[in-house]
Image (spheres, helix red, strand yellow):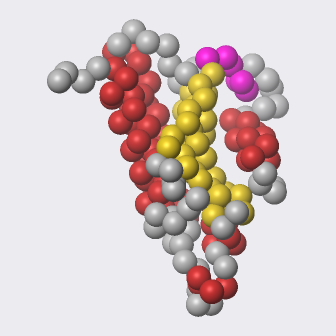
Amino acid sequence: MTKVFEDYFSELQADMVSICLEYVNNKADMIYIYGSNEFGQFSTDVFYQINNIIVKKHKVNDAVSDTDSNSRPVYDISKERQVTLLNILNKNLREISDLCKKNNREMPTEMKLTYDVSKNKLDAQYSYEIKYTNDPEKLSSHIFDDWFEEVGGKL
């Protein structure tokens, strides 16, 4: 069977989920991946639900119970690891953009991917509207923070 645009698009999103899951050693309840592309300005970030606590990638150890940790962090949240994670997510987002161009499809300006680990279910919300580049104060990180708070995270 020949692969079509949707297959490639889904594979790239699945790769984004996979790298985010790897970051937390496959130990998360939910993964929330944000991707933005406005006028060629790519931005990604991720936050997690672990033990019913919503945390950003640099705070995942805050969601670990004492019985899990044996007094030491469970997750490697080093700067290098965080940068590597975001670099891979940005690479995937650029590949999605290239795929859209190659297939004469409109590239979403915003992607919100929500992955339920236990159900192995990915939900995706796409927007094609400009969210921040038309605002002198707003950055993609503001949109990400708004989504984080909306889901229940504490800034």
Q: Quadrant of the C terminus?
A: bottom right
Q: Quadrant of the N terminus?
A: top left
Depth check, front residue: 40 or 56: 56
Q: Residue at x 59, y 25 (%)?
A: 126
Task: Identify whether 137 is placed above or below 127.
Answer: below
Depth check, front residue: 102 or 65: 65
Residue 90, image x and y in percent? 48, 40
Which quarter of the figure has residue 100? top left
Depth check, front residue: 141 or 73: 73
Q: Residue at x 55, y 36 (%)?
A: 123
Depth check, front residue: 109 or 64: 64
For this view, does 10 lie left or right of residue 114? left
Residue 70, image x and y in percent? 59, 90
Q: Residue at x 61, y 17 (%)?
A: 128
Q: Residue furthest front?
A: 119
Could you tell me if residue 61 is visible in this image? yes
Q: Residue furthest top?
A: 104
Q: Residue furthest left?
A: 1
For this view, does 155 lie left or right of residue 50? right
Could you tell me if residue 44 is visible in this image? no
Residue 142, image x and y in percent? 76, 39
Task: Identify whether 20 is placed above or below 129.
Answer: below
Q: Main secondary structure of the magenta part?
A: loop
For this view, does 48 lie left or right of residue 150? left
Task: Identify whether 72 is placed above or below 11.
Answer: below
Which quarter of the figure has residue 132? top right
Q: Is residue 62 magenta?
A: no
Part of the protein shown in magenta: 128-133
For this view, does 114 lie left or right of residue 146? left
Q: Residue at x 19, y 21 (%)?
A: 2
